[in-house]
Image (spheres, grey):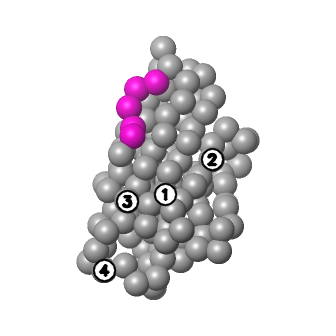
Amino acid sequence: QVQLVESGGGLVQPGGSLRLSCAASGSILSINYMGWYRQAPGKERELVAVLTSSGIRNLGDFVEGRFTISGDSALNTVHLQMNSLKPEDTAVYYCNAHIGLTHYWGKGTLVTVSS
């Protein structure tokens, strides 16, 4: 079994920064990609950023250069650096990993951007 543990959410003022981290543990054979999705109240879950095992980054259109995803060489840990946060970035952020033929999800961490 695989577990994804997220950390780093919280309350931040507009224009501020947060760094989210996700660590994978358990029966990890081959991680194809890891990354982040988010879901705001009343909205569908959407892609924020993913990092593939070959180093390719896929970012949501709304990122606009504000967020950066990085990971260790084994892709067991990924980080999401979020700068210039806006109120519309408020959501639950979920870590996602595609390992073998299976998608795994973390429990989510709440990010609130408010003054």
Report how far apart the C-alphas of labels 3 and 2 lie in the structure.
17 Å
| N-term mark: 3 or 1 | 3
Q: Amino acid at mark 2?
A: Thr
Q: Spatial distance from mark 3 to mark 4, Cα to Cα?
A: 13 Å
What residue is pinned by disc 2? 68
- Secondary structure, mark 2, is strand
Amino acid residing under circle 3: Ala
Q: Work out how far the residue at label 1 is from the one at label 2, CA to CA, in angstroms.
A: 10 Å
Q: Is residue 109 found left or right of 13 in the rendered image?
A: left
Pointers 3 and 1 in contact (C-beta within 8 Å): no
State the predominant SS element of the stretch in magenta: strand
In terms of depth relative to the viewer, which is nearer, 88 or 64?
Answer: 64
Left or right of 18 in this view: 3:
left
**Range drawn in magenta:** 8-12
Q: Which residue is labeled 3 in the image?
A: 23
Residue position marked by numbered label 4 in the rendering = 27
Q: CA distance from mark 2 to mark 4?
A: 27 Å
